[in-house]
């Protein structure tokens, strides 16, 4: 055993405590943003709807829309194309070629368009690399901002993915260790004191939420780590060892869809006929269409389908792009079904919770919210047990700042989005300015106010007011009103408006007079209650 002086031991314990709290707060941020990102598509539909509801994003006439756009694109970008529905069910089409940047990383360069499926009108056209095109995406900017926070905390790759992967592993360790240390697991599923000290009731709430959430936490942690480490380490490492660093070749091999090379020019088959055929072959709807080698004899059209009723995976169909002939059905990974391919296909629906539409998303949202609650209440309990020490009092204020400042900062980004979208083409810097501005104000409050309860009340109240006012801001900035939205069938707009108002009112209701809060309970009382 290493012998340390008392002073050095205290220093190391302080470093240990700070690092643990910092890791926990980052994990809370990833869980909270992931919980919101479950409804990323709905947030995009709410923030940027078309004037009427689009029931079918691939209607008859899709072939004409894609074909007309392809004719306006430089043939050098006909190497690959894909199209799928985005905000408001706009048809997003991207013709591109593959290249490498200055650092040798793969990227795509081409021309993208957002098309109104009803009329075929091109609503927006952008050119450049995939990063340039995404940076000027107005319709999806708000939802992509939230998704980016969840996926990599907006830290450049691979570092952001590595960090979220580590946080996923930390969550996995917490889930497994939580299962082990809770010896009375069944009893703790139903133990919630109705009377007694506020601290004990808070601890019971933390334990019961964490216990019920253990299986879900394990699933999310495992699948999240898989996606983060797979993108940051797995693909580059295998590509370097087997394919000389060619990641595109690796993905092409894994997907199992490499076309036989035949550059002979050939007209494209009717995409409407292909879409009609996949619907006839399956009881699922198409979600994403990829086209390799547009206008060539070796062209392949791959159609990815939604999940069948009662299934966690959807089929994939491959057609000849030149003749429209059906070639084969394939799993997501490889050309023949396999255990590995099945496990790979299950990762996305289990992580995103989108396998049963809004119902499964709602369940995943509730479980994710419970996970965020468990992580932040655990940190509050941990810091307040040690609040008699100055450093832990500071950590308690830091925890309150992140716990209640992060939701406020996310709402502030939404407040910046609506007025800015009418002025600036690149909205991410504007949303970042609002996000960090709100976070800075919250940090000043947390630093100046010594009472964590006051920090909580001010930040939670501000978040509540901002949420209640968000639908009004959306409408004042040119958004559709409720009557017009109802007549147009835009139920998502009304539903999310009501959800934000309800969430804001809940935040304000939480400020009601209550018994001494957890964050006011001194450590000495905690130990006495334990005894």
Image (cartoon, helix red, strand yellow):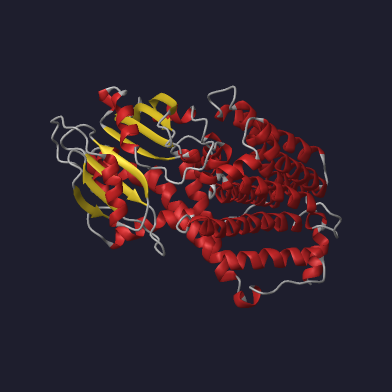
Query: On screen, 460 above or below 520?
Result: above
**Relative image position of residue 482 (x, y in whole percent):** 65, 42
Say how many tags the image has.
0
Q: Quadrant of the N terminus?
A: bottom right
Q: Is residue 186 above or below residue 302?
A: below
**In this view, 13 is above or below 78:** below
Quadrant location of residue 296? top left
The structure residue drawn at horizontal position 25% and vertical position 54%, both measured from the top left corner, is 330
**Residue 486 seen in the current view:** yes
The residue furthest front is 487
Residue 318 left/right relative to 515: left
For residue 359, side relative to residue 208 (left or right): left
Query: Viewed as shown, does residue 200 lie left or right of 427?
Result: right
Q: Quadrant of the C terminus?
A: bottom right
Q: From the viewer's perspective, is residue 363 above or below residue 37?
A: below
State the image coordinates of residue 178 (x, y, percent, origin top left): 58, 66
Residue 236 rendering spot, x and y as whole percentages:
33, 41
Observer-nearest of 215 and 41:
41
Name the residue at 38% across, 43% down. Answer: 58
Who's the residue at 25% across and 42% down the image?
A: 301
Q: Residue at x 51, y 59 (%)?
A: 360
Q: Is residue 383 left or right of residue 295?
A: right
In percent of width and height, residue 14 lies at 67, 49
């Amino acid at each position: 055993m290493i012998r340390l002086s008392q002073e050095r031991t205290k220093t190391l314990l302080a470093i240990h405590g700070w690092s643990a709290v910092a890791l926990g707060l980052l994990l809370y941020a990833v869980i909270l943003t992931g919980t919101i990102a479950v409804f990323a598509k709905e947030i995009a539909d709410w923030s940027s709807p078309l004037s009427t509801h689009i029931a079918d994003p691939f209607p008859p006439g899709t072939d004409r829309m894609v074909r007309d756009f392809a004719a306006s694109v430089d043939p050098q970008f006909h190497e690959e194309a894909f199209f799928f529905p985005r905000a408001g069910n706009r048809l997003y089409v991207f013709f591109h070629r593959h290249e490498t940047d200055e650092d040798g990383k793969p990227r795509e360069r081409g021309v993208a368009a957002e098309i109104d499926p009803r009329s075929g009108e091109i609503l927006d056209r952008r050119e450049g690399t995939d990063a340039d095109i995404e940076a000027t995406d107005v319709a999806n900017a708000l939802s992509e901002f939230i998704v980016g926070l969840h996926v990599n905390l907006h830290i450049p790759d691979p570092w952001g993915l590595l960090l979220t992967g580590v946080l996923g592993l930390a969550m996995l360790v917490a889930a497994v260790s939580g299962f082990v240390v809770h010896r009375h697991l069944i009893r703790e599923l139903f133990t919630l004191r109705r009377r007694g000290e506020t601290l004990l009731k808070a601890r019971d709430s933390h334990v019961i939420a964490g216990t019920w959430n253990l299986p879900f936490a394990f699933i999310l942690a495992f699948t999240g780590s898989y996606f983060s480490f797979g993108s940051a380490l797995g693909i580059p490492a295998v590509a370097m060892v087997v394919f000389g660093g060619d990641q595109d070749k690796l993905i092409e091999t894994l997907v199992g869809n490499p076309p036989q090379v035949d550059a002979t020019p050939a007209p494209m088959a009717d995409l409407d006929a292909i879409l009609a055929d996949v619907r006839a072959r399956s009881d699922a709807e198409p979600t994403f269409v990829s086209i390799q080698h547009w206008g060539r004899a070796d062209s392949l059209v791959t159609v990815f389908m939604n999940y069948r009723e009662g299934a966690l995976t959807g089929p994939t169909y491959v057609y000849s792009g030149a003749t429209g002939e059906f070639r084969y059905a394939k799993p997501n990974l490889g050309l023949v079904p396999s255990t590995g391919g099945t496990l790979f296909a299950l990762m996305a629906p289990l992580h995103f919770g989108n396998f049963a539409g809004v119902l499964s998303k709602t369940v995943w949202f509730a479980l994710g919210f419970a996970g965020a609650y468990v992580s932040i209440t655990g940190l509050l309990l941990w810091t307040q047990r040690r609040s008699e020490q100055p450093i832990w009092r500071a950590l308690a204020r830091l925890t309150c700042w992140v716990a209640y400042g992060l939701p406020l900062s996310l709402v502030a980004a939404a407040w910046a989005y609506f007025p800015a979208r009418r002025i600036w083409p690149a909205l991410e810097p504007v949303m970042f300015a609002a996000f960090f501005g709100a976070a800075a104000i919250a940090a000043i409050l947390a630093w100046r106010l010594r009472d964590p309860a006051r920090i909580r009340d001010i930040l939670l109240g501000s978040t509540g007011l901002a949420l209640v006012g968000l639908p009004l801001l959306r409408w004042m900035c040119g958004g559709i009103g409720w009557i017009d939205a109802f007549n147009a069938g835009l139920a998502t707009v009304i539903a999310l408006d009501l959800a934000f108002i309800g969430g804001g009112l809940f935040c304000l209701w939480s400020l009601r007079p209550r018994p001494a809060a957890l964050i006011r309970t001194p450590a000495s009382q905690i130990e006495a209650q334990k005894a």
